[in-house]
């Protein structure tokens, strides 16, 4: 569900008109609803309350310090994929003992740093990574919790770029190697094998692949138990989709019910790593129409946000709803909503029917996840401001970048 609503033909996030945000902080600008983030996080927590569970928010979805801080206040855990994300979580007041470190390419320094900070667990993705963590932990004289990420070869039926649980994907260890790998890890003196994990993809809009993955994990759990390896955690990753274009997506409660039904039969803690389902529909990208251009075959609304600000349409052909901030009576025309970047892939939406004039504001909906966090400085464009709304208050949570900052690390030959 979107965090947007109209009042008297003006678009609001909570009790703040987006036109006010634009006047105060300029555009392009990401705007988030604190209430929506909290509601989504609590929906997972409430629906899982009958079983031991741990929600580790996937930091990559949106890593703004204020957002991490509000999740830390809710007692959330965090799923990270780099030492940069680790430092962000700690800077935002997150608890190291609730951090899971995922990712296929952890460098030695990153592993060392995470061990020194006493994180909760590493999700191991290969035999050599296990050996690497063992060696570093031993040198530091520590015993570290690890979980094995398995690739269950399940088709999550999502975009190919965000499907991660197929055997052709780089993630996890092959399912046929999982048991022997667990035995191998369990025998490593500095590693404490606490669980198994899988993450089959993102923007999954059907519960069936999750159910198959969960069943697979519990079959593996049973096999390991027979071999004398008793696991404590089952990590099902993230991936629950949101509705971008009126897709029917499973409610958080239904997803949690599925997890609860299966898991309650076992003495384990379930771990989930949701990103998009917590922050996706809690944020929008606010942009202004700079020019209206009538081409021979198409009409274009050229806005001040581009593919560097929101990459999803260019990278995944993602469809996100685009709404006028101030509704006016004019006749609707079909526009491609495009940015100022010098590429034809620089579009935010194609063939949208809107009544528009130059200077109008638009909101690109459901941009809270993988929006700002994937933005770049392409075309030497400063990254946008970010604003958090709470009731009738708006707070700048990231200043717009200054042009000088963009080349301040460069050295002239
Ligand atoms: N856990 C792991 C190990 C992951 O790799 C991911 C996302 C998540 C959890 C969180 O998944 P979520 O609940 O957000 O679906 N940039 C893409 C999405 C990439 C997802 C990468 N991994 C997009 O904009 O659609």
Image: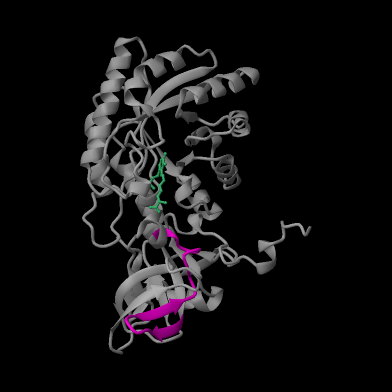
Is 307 a magenta residue?
Answer: yes
**Residue at the front extreme of this rendering:** 296
| Residue lying at 62% horizontally and 65% vertically, measured from the top left | 401
Vertical placement of residue 344 versus 298, above or below = above
| Most distant residue in the right direction | 413
Q: Quadrant of residue 89?
A: top right
| Residue drawn at 34 percent across, 84 percent down | 296
Count of residue discs: 0
- Name of the residue lying farthest toward the bottom: 330
Q: Is residue 304 left or right of residue 402?
A: left
Q: Residue 246 at x, y = what percent?
A: 23, 61
In the rendered image, residue 179, in percent from the top left (x then y), is placed at 35, 17
Residue at horizontal 33%, vertical 38%?
200
Could you say which is closer to the camera, residue 196 or residue 406? 406
Q: Which residues are magenta?
A: 290-312
Quadrant (top left/top right/bottom left/bottom right) for the N terminus = bottom left
Q: Give the left or right position of residue 69, taking residue 317 as reference.
A: right
């Amino acid at each position: 569900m979107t965090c947007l609503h109209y009042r008297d033909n003006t678009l609001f996030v909570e009790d703040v008109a987006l036109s006010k945000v634009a006047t105060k902080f300029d555009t392009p600008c990401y705007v988030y609803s604190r209430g929506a983030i909290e509601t989504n996080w609590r929906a997972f927590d409430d629906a899982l309350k009958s079983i031991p569970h741990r929600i580790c928010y996937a930091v990559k979805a949106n890593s703004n310090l204020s957002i991490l801080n509000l999740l830390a206040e809710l007692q959330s855990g965090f799923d990270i994929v780099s030492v940069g994300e680790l430092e962000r979580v700690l800077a935002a007041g997150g608890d190291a003992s609730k951090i899971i470190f995922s990712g296929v390419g952890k460098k030695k320094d990153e592993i060392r740093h995470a061990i020194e900070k006493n994180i909760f667990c590493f999700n191991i993705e290969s035999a050599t990574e296990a050996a690497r963590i063992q060696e570093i932990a031993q040198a530091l004289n520590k015993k570290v919790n690890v979980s094995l990420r398995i690739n269950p070869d399940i088709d999550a039926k999502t975009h190919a770029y965000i499907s991660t649980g197929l055997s052709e994907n780089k993630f996890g260890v092959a399912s046929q190697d999982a048991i022997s790998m667990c035995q191998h890890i369990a025998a490593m003196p500095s590693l404490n094998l606490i669980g198994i994990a899988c993450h089959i993809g993102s923007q999954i809009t059907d519960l069936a692949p999750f159910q198959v993955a969960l069943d697979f994990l519990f079959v593996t759990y049973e096999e390991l138990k027979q071999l004398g390896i008793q696991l404590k955690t089952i990590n099902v990753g993230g991936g629950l989709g949101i509705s971008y274009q009126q897709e029917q997506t499973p409610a958080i409660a239904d997803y949690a019910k599925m997890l609860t039904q299966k898991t309650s039969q076992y003495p384990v803690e379930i771990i989930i790593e949701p990103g998009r389902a917590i922050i996706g529909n809690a944020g929008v990208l606010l942009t202004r129409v700079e020019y209206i251009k009538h081409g021979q075959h198409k009409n274009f609304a050229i806005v001040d946000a581009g593919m560097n600000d929101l990459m999803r349409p260019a990278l995944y052909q993602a469809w996100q709803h685009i709404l006028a901030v101030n509704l006016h009576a004019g006749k609707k025309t079909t526009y491609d909503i495009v940015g100022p970047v010098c590429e034809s892939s620089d579009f935010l939406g194609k063939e949208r029917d809107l009544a528009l004039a130059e200077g109008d504001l638009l909101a690109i909906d459901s941009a809270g996840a993988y929006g700002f966090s994937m933005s770049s400085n392409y075309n030497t464009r400063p990254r946008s401001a970010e604003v958090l709304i709470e009731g009738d208050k708006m707070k700048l949570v990231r200043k717009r970048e200054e042009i000088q900052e963009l080349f301040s690390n460069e050295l002239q030959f």
